[in-house]
Image (cartoon, grey):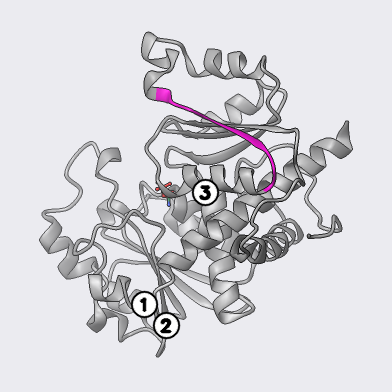
Amino acid sequence: MPSDSYFFAQPHFLRIAGLNRLEVISLLDKADSYVEQSRRRQKTSDRLQGLTQINLFFEPSTRTQSSFEIAGKRLGLDVINMPIGSSSVSKGETLLDTAVTLNAMHPDLLVVRHGASGAAELLSQKVDCAVINAGDGTHEHPTQALLDALAIRRTLGDLDGLRVAICGDIAHSRVARSNVALLNLLNVEVRLCGPPTLLPSDADRWGAEVFHNMDEAVADCDVVMVLRLQSERMDSAAIPSKREYFRFYGLDRNRLSHAKPGALVMHPGPMNRGVEIASDIADDLSISLVTKQVEMGVAVRMAVLDMLATARNEAI
Ligand code: CP
């Protein structure tokens, strides 16, 4: 069981931007200890017994929602998944009315995914419990960045001085924003790469070097992180065709050969095989961290739930 000598005193977990290095390292250290708990036969503890967690996902999710549910249950929380499709949202109830209604039932932790950037922050101003951002529009996905960093740290050791290329649909990616912010805190050199139509106009101010040529972007990198084309967030065709996109921006063996020998490959999922990544790379466990990222997701979310519940308890 981890000690409580970690430093994280935030009331909510809404974004990586604004956190400091000590807070991030504390979360990673705590998550590290929870990896072992998840590998045991007996996986649950009573650490947060008696507290209630509500998962409120307005956008589809496989990894994030299920890992938050598993994380809460492994800490002894009572976990409720709100089925949005059959909730009163379908009768026109607003996000805020939904949150205020759930708040009246005295949850301790509210995990929110929503298509609007800033939705989690808005809710945090209306409820009494701790709010966790599980992805808000194109803004941030802070637990994804934490789990990505933990997966790298457990594979390569210290992140200090590593070079990481984040490639693909940067413009619509909350994962990219959270990762750049977190990797900058850990002294990682970050590169962003994608076609001009899929790079935000302010990308050069994110704290990363911007590339349009993927071979150049991955050159001498320790890690290549590939992102999904988020067609659901595009209002016009940003690429001529998926086939052409793969030709210029898909990660295959030939392209990966420009990176450092043994360079790691990451993808937050869900993957579009043959669009942004070749299957043989995604499935090569000697270089692909894709399933390790998923495993780290449970541990990271246990750490975030624990840190918030502990900080909240100490503040009362
Ligand atoms: N990486 C991620 O957020 O995946 P899900 O959409 O499946 O939660």
Mark 1 vs mark 2, foreground winner is 2
Residue plotted at (69% across, 47% down): 75
Report the Cα–Cα distance between label 3 and label 2: 27 Å
Residue where numbered disc 3 is placed: 67
Residue 280 image position (x, y, % from top left): 25, 76
Report whether 166 appears left or right of 231.
Answer: right
**Along the line of sight, the residue nearer the viewer: 95 or 70:** 70
Magenta stretch containing residue 43, yes or no? no
Q: Which residue lies furthest to the front in this view?
A: 41
Q: Which amino acid does label 1 sit on?
A: Val
The answer as to whether callout 3 falls within 8 Å of ligand 1 is yes
Residue 242 image position (x, y, % from top left): 14, 57
Residue 207 shows in the view: no
Residue where numbered disc 2 is placed: 263
Q: Earlier in the sequence, mark 3 or mark 2?
A: 3
Where is 209 relative to 137, above or below?
below
Residue 310 image position (x, y, % from top left): 80, 43
Residue plotted at (58% across, 26% down): 122
Disc 1: CA contacts within 10 A as few (<14), some (14-19) or many (>=20): many
Where is 270 relative to 97, above or below?
below
The magenta span reads 75-84
Residue plotted at (65% across, 42% down): 13
Q: Quadrant of residue 276?
A: bottom left
Report whether 238 appears left or right of 78.
Answer: left
Report the Cα–Cα distance between label 1 and label 3: 30 Å
Q: Quadrant of residue 127?
A: top right
Q: What residue type is labelled 2?
A: Ala
